[in-house]
Amino acid sequence: MAKVIDKRSAILNTALDLLVENGFHNTPMSLIAKEAGVSAGIIYHYFESKEELILELYREVKQKIISLELEADFQNLNGLGVLKQVLEQFENSPYIKMCLNEFNTQLQRLFVWTEAEKRAGNIIDLPIEVLYELSIGVAVSLAKQQSAGIIHINDEILDQVSAAIFRSIQPART
C-alpha cells in the first residue's frame, strides 16, 4: 500500500512543480509521467483525466493552506507562496467552477474558527476578508517577494514578521 501512495504522491508533487513552472496548459500528462518516473498508464490508474488530477491537486493544496491558516503556521512562508501560486492559477481558470461547492464547505470551517476567536476576544472583530489580508495576505505577499528574489527573509526576520502579523489581528489590550 505504501508504494501506491508513494506513486500517487510523486505524481501530485511533480504536477505541482510543473504547474508552477509551466502553467496548466503547458503541462501535458506525458511530462508529468516522465518527471514523476511513472508511466502515463499509472497516472490514469489514479486519475481519469488531467482535469481530475488538477482538481485533486487543488483539493490537497487548498486543504494544506487551510490547515496552515488554522494553525497560524507562518513559519512556512516559502511553501505557502508556492501553494498560493498554484491556487491563483487554478482560481483564475475554468477548473474553479468544478469544485467551488466542495471548498465552500471546507472554508466554512475556517470561518467558524475565525468567528469563535473573535467572540473569545482573541482576534479583532473585523470581516474575515480583512483579517485574511492582515494575516495570510501579508504572508503570501512576502512569500511571493522572496520567491521572486526581491527580498530575503532570514529566520530572525521571519520570527519578527510572524509576531507582527499575529499582533495585527489581536485586539488592543488596555
Image (cartoon, helix red, strand yellow):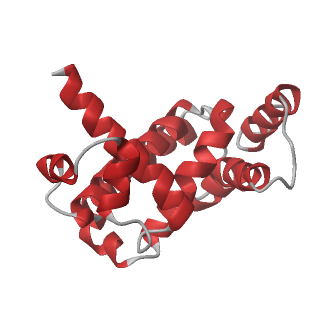
**Image location (x, y in percent) of residue 88:** 52, 65
Q: Name the quarter where the N terminus is drawn.
A: top left
- Give the vertical position of 78 relative to 145 (above or below): above
Q: In the figure, is residue 50 to the left or right of 68? A: left
In the rendered image, the quadrant that contains the C terminus is: top right
User: Looking at the picture, does residue 85 appear above or below residue 155?
Assistant: below
45 left or right of 25?
left
Q: Residue at x 22, y 21 (%)?
A: 2
**Residue occupying image coordinates x 47% and y 75%:** 92
In the image, farthest residue toward the top? 2
In the drawing, does residue 2 fall left or right of residue 165? left
Direction from residue 123 to residue 39 in the image, left or right: left
**Residue 73 placement (x, y as % from top left):** 60, 31
x, y (%) of residue 23? Answer: 49, 68
Considering depth in this image, is 71 or 152 the residue closer to the camera? 152
Task: Please give the name of the residue rendered at 75% of the width and 34% of the height, measured from the top-left corner.
Answer: 162
